[in-house]
Image (cartoon, rainbow, N blue to C red):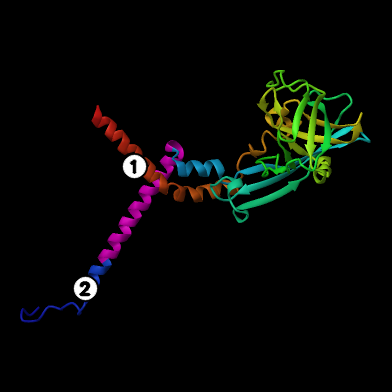
Amino acid sequence: MNETEEKPTAPAGFETQKKPRKKRRLWKKILLGLLIIHLVFTVIDALWLRGPGVSEVFQYLGKTQLTVSDLRYRIEPETNELVVTWTESFDTSILPIPVYSIPAWAKIHEKTEHPERRIPLDPMPEEIVRCFVDVTADPDSPPTKTMPPLAGPLGDLGPWFTEEHAVLVEPSESQDMISYELPPDMVFRLTVRPEDVPRLSGMFIMTPRLGGHPSFLIMIPQPGEQDGRRVMFLSRKGDGGYTPYYEDLCVKWRQVSQEPDGFLTVCWKILWLPLAALPDWIWAAYGLFILFMLLRVK
């Protein structure tokens, strides 16, 4: 080659195009490295660390929960039975959040059932006690209170008659009534306004003082009267706010199903784990900082 010949020169702008390409490759490598580090941390977090984010995925995501609501009682005199009805709803969470705290769109509703249970009252079951209520209509009686629906299977229990309305007559107030086992055939005097008398035909709450202490009695009326007194039924453990067969029917009113996860649920959890592990970085860093400070103190 002739030494005088000029060497080929790069096109104008070639050097300036080369630098951005190198920068883009560098950023891709950095992002890929961060992604690999995060995936490794996610695996470690899921298998051993179990930070808050990952724990909620395992605890709530894809879990089917049974919610018991609208627990109602009624007495059928014809068959002399206590009839218990309630609603069971089965919902599956598609987010790592408890079913009862997420909106409807974030859960899959599977089914709703309305079971019924009939309990004969002759002989009287051990869990139920009978009591009597003398009702007096008085226009000067204070109005009833409205208790907001209680959580769980209790729900709306009807009107609330306080100690201003209800007084224990038998046994006497001096007797110790703090026991969780209420005696049968207690007698109460209930003073209500005339317009509130019809409200005694359904479930209602009475909170008289038993032995000088507050109580919470859920009353289930029987239609008709006996010796001029209204007949009511309540749980033998009624002083604690229980209803008959409350523990038997509804102690697990929100119950997480123990069935193993299906294939789709497992896949959905795997997809969620990298996202759920992001806040666990902060949790892990905070733990390392505390450990470091403790080691320095030593």
> Residue 38, image x and y in percent?
38, 48
Element carrying mark 1 = helix
Q: Quadrant of the N terminus?
A: bottom left
Q: Label 2 sits on what residue type? A: Thr
Q: Residue furthest top?
A: 175
Q: Which residues are magenta?
A: 22-49
Closest to the observer: 203 or 172?
A: 172
Q: CA distance from mark 2 to mark 1?
A: 41 Å
Nearer to us: label 2 or label 1: 1
- Residue nearest the viewer, comparing 294 with 136: 136
Label 1 packing within 10 angstroms: few (<14), some (14-19), many (20+): few
State the image coordinates of residue 293 (x, y, percent, origin top left). 27, 34
The quarter holding residue 295 reads top left
Q: Is 2 rendered above or below residue 102?
A: below
Left or right of residue 59: residue 291: left
The residue tagged 2 is 16
